[in-house]
Amino acid sequence: MSEEPGDAPSDQQLSEALVRGLRGEAGGDDNEPFGEPGIMTGGTRIGEVSAERDAILGDKISHTYFLGGAAREREPAPLTVSRQTLEEVRHAFVAPKGFDQLSVRQHLLILRVAGGRGGGTAAIRLLLDEGVADVRELAPDAALRRISADRLEPRVGYLLRNATRTVVEELTEFDVARLCEELGARDGRLILTVDPAVRIPAGLLEREYTATLPDGPTALDVLAAHLRHRLRHQETGSRRADEIVGHESVIGMVAEWADREDRASRAAAFARVLADAERADDFDLERIRDRLNRVADAKFEAWFDDLDYGNRCFAISLATLPGYSYEIVSDAAAELERTLTPPVAREPGTPPPDPFKTLRSSRLDAVLARVSCRPVPTRYGITPMEIVGFIDQSLSWRILHRVWTEYPQTREALLQWLRALARHPVVAVRQGAANAVGVFAVQAFDYVRRYVIHPWALSPNAVDRHAAATALMAPAGDAAVSGATRLMVYEWHLDVSKPNVRNTAARAYGCIGLADLEEALDAFAHLVTGPDHLVQVVANSITSLIVQADDKSVLTILRQLRYWMTSPVLDPPNGSARARRDSTPQERAEDQRSRLYAAYFAFLTVAVDAKLVKPVDDRAEATAWHGLLWLADRNGDIAEVVGGLWATALVHPISHTAAVGVLESWAETVEPDGRGRDTLARLLASATRDNTRARGVVYQQARDWRAGTDATAPRTAEAVLAALPDKPARDGR
C-alpha cells in the first residue's frame, strides 16, 4: 500500500531506510590518507552525503529562506584547551624559580607577565595543579562582569590570556569579589595573564588577587624537557634527547637567544624541529641550523620575499597541504602559478620554458622542506609514499599569514585557487584547502565568510558544504573570532535557514561541536526534525565527534542518544520559526519519532563506522576493534551506556534489522582476536542481563554466526553463548 501524502512513515519504511543508509558507502582512491592518523577513524562516509541522500525517505526538500538575526539563549561556551596541550604542559613544563609559591588562593588570579614569556602555559599549569578537570579559554575581551555561576562548569579552570587593558582597568573590588564567589560556588578557577604595563586598580593590588610570574627557566632546560616529551614513544627516546641537548652545536644555537624574553617559546619550537628531524631520519644539525637561521625573526620576511616565483608558489602550496605527497603538492603549486599568472601566447621564435630548469632537491632546500618515505594504506594495500613537509611546522601558518597580509593583490586569485583545490578528487587535499581558507578567516573573518565560506554553505554540492564546515575549525578555535563563528553556525542550523545551509550547519557541528557540546547536541535535536530530515548528516557528524572526543564527551553524546530513544518533548531553539508559535500535537509527535529514528541511525552509524586505526594492542592475533567496543572495554560507564543502546536497538522494529547486521560485523572483526571475543561477549551478557527480548536476539544471532559451512564468526559465537545466562525461552523476535 502506498503512503499517502502527509502520512508518517511506518516502522517498516524507517527500518528499510536505516538499512539503506548504513549500506551507503564512499570509497576508492579519493580517500587516500595523509598526515598522522588518530586513534580512531570515522570511516569514509563522513562528509560524502549528498543533498538527495539527506532525506531519510527521499522526501522532496522544501525551500525556506534565511532570515538571520537570531538571538541565542546563552553566549558561546569558552574554548576547550586541547588534550594535547594539556599533556604537553603536564609533562614538559619547566617551572621557573619561585613558581611553587604561586597559587589561585581566592579562585581568581591576575598573573602579570610580558607577552611571549610563557604566561599562558604557566597559567594552564597553575590551573592543573589546582586540580581542575578541564581548562577553558576566554576571549581576550570577554565581559567578566557578565560571568555568573550558571554559566560556569564545576571544577573547570578558565584562562583569559593577554587580557586587554580595558578588561583589567574596568574591574572593581566588587566585581572581583562577586567573581570569586561565583567561581567558588562551582569550585572553579580563573587566571588572567596581563602585561605588567597595564594598570591594575589599587584595591586589587592590596589583596591576594595578583602575582608576578618569576623569570623563566633556561632555554636549555625547556629544550630538554620538550625533546624528551616528543621522543617519549621511542625506545631510547630519553637517552637520545639527552645526547641531542648535550651536542655542542645545539648548545651553541640555544646560546644565541638564551637571554631573550621569548626564549622558552623558542626552545619549545626548536624541540619540535629537532624531534621531527630525528623521526624523519634527517638529523643534520648544520643543515637545521642554516635553515632555521634563514627564517629567524625578520629574516623570515626576507627569505620568503626573495624566493623566486616558482619556489614561492611551491611554498604556498606546501603551507596549504603540509604532510601530503610530493606529487600532489607540486601539482597544486603548478596550478597556483597558472591561476596567479595565466599562460600567454609566446612570441614567435621564443624558446619554450625549460621543464628541467628546477631540480627537486634545489626546490626543497630553497623552501626549507624535506621529503620522507612512509608506508601509506591505499585501496590496494600498504604502499610507500613520499611525503613532503617543512622542517619547521610553524612555517605553514607564517607563510599563509605573510601572503594574506603583505600581498593583498593576490587574494582574489588565491581564494580562486583554494576553491578549485577544495574540489580535488582526494578528500585529504580538499580538507587542506578548506583548512587554509580557515586560516585566512581568522585574519579576515567577515571577508572570507562573505566571499568563500557562505557561498560554500549555500552550494548544492556536498563537497562544497563540507569544505565550509571544515574551514570553520580554525576560526572556531581562535578566541578572538570563536564567538562570531559559533553564532553564525547557530543561525545556520535554525529552521528559517535554507536547506543547504542547515545541511552545512549539521556538518559544521561535527567539526567544531566539541567546543560547546551542549549546543551541538541541542542543534542536532533540531536538525533531525522538520522537512529537511538531515538524519544521515547528523549521524556522520556525531560519529566524527566521538572519534575526536575524550571519554567524558563520548559519554555525554551516547547518553543523549539514549535520551532521544525515550521520545522526549523538546522545546524548539530560540530564533527558529517553531519557537514563534505553539507546536501542534501532531508536530510534537513527528518530532519525537524523527529523533527516535535519528538516535538509532546515529548509534548504528557510530557502531559500524568508528574503528581503531591500528590493532588494539601488540598481540599477533589482535585486530582493529570497532571504536565503541574499545571505549566500552576501557570505561565502565561507557560500557553501560553502549550496552543499553545495543539492548534497545536489537529489539526495536525500526532498528532491529540494521542492528543485527552491525552486530555481526563486530563479531566478524573480533573473530581472530581472543581478547576481542571475550570483551564483546562480556558486553552483550551485561547488556541483556535484565532484558529477555534482547538476550533472545543475541542468542539467536550467535547461533547464526556459527551455523553452516560458511559460518561468519563461530569462535565469537561460542564466546557469546558461553557468557550468556540460561538459554532464553524465546528468541525475542
Image: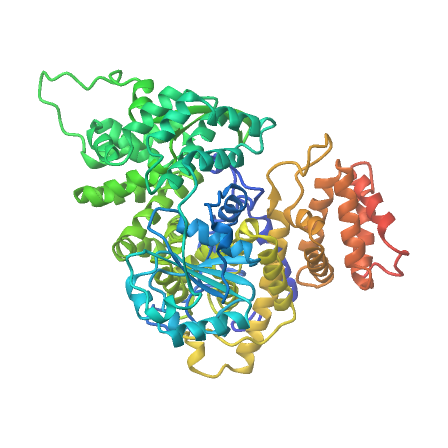
Compared to residue 526, the image places residue 625 above or below, namely above
Compared to residue 291, the image places residue 682 above or below, namely below
Residue at 83% in and 53% down: 699
Where residue 346 sits, quadrant-wise, is top left
Instruction: Identify the image quadrant of the N terminus.
Output: bottom right
Query: x%, y% of residue 564?
Result: 61, 68
**Which of these two is toward me, 196 or 692?**
196
**Which of these two is toward me, 494 or 96?**
96
Compared to residue 314, the image places residue 586 above or below, namely below
Residue at 26% in and 53% down: 444
**Residue 731 visible here:** yes
- In-image side of 466 versus 559 (left or right): left
Where residue 130 sits, quadrant-wise, is bottom right
Query: x%, y% of residue 219?
Result: 41, 36
Instruction: Give the number of marks.
Output: 0
Query: x%, y% of residue 448?
Result: 28, 53
Instruction: Identify the image quadrant of the C terminus.
Output: bottom right
**Which of these two is toward me, 289 or 398?**
289
The extreme left residue here reads 348
Compared to residue 675, the image places residue 190 above or below, namely below
Query: x%, y% of residue 197?
Result: 28, 57
- In-image side of 361 versus 533 (left or right): left
**Residue 9 visible here:** no
Residue at 89% in and 56% down: 727
